[in-house]
Image (cartoon, rainbow, N blue to C red):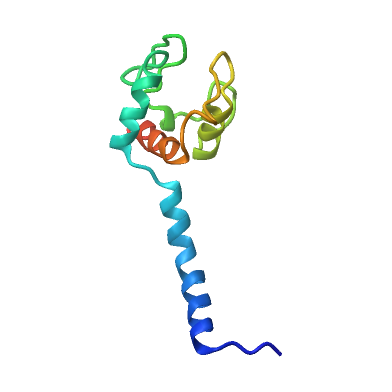
Amino acid sequence: MLKMKPLGILTVCLCVAAAPWALAGAASGDAAKGKTVFDNCAVCHNADSTEAKMGPGLKGLFKKDKLKNGKKVTDANVLDRINEGGGGMPGYKDMLTDGEKNDLIAYLKTL
């Protein structure tokens, strides 16, 4: 049987207890910072209407049932669209940091 010292047990317990908060923080973003990221997207997308520019207007995006590609509007599907692009939109997988993408999604939720 494996024996652990009390300090080792405490460390493992703290890591397990902290994991959900660490993961939640990693997935959340700052909408104010996301607005700054969106300034680059505004060339192709309206934030204040559903009227299309080169790409669809994004007002109310997270209130819609589906994206243009037919997928359900979820954080994961919007992130996939940001990363991979599609329908004429380039992918931003390597152009934005994970933090910028999280901030952008937080901003899109405010539209």
Q: Is residue 91 above or below residue 16?
A: above
Rendered location of residue 48, percent (x, y): 31, 19
Q: Is residue 69 visible?
A: yes
Quadrant containing the N terminus in the rendered view: bottom right
Above or below — where is 5 with respect to 85?
A: below
Who is closer to the viewer here, 85 or 1? 1
Taking the spot 49% from the left edge, 28% from the top edge, the residue there is: 95
- Residue 66 showing in the rendered view: no
> Is residue 49 rendered to the left or right of residue 65?
left
Q: Position of residue 23 (x, y in %)?
A: 48, 55
Q: Nearer the viewer, residue 29 or 111?
A: 29
Whole-percent x and y of residue 2?
A: 68, 87
Residue 53 coordinates in the image, percent (x, y): 41, 9
Quarter holding the C terminus is: top left
Is 69 positioned to the left or the right of 109 in the image? right
Q: Name the residue at 51% across, 89% down.
A: 6
Q: Residue at x 46, y 31 (%)?
A: 96
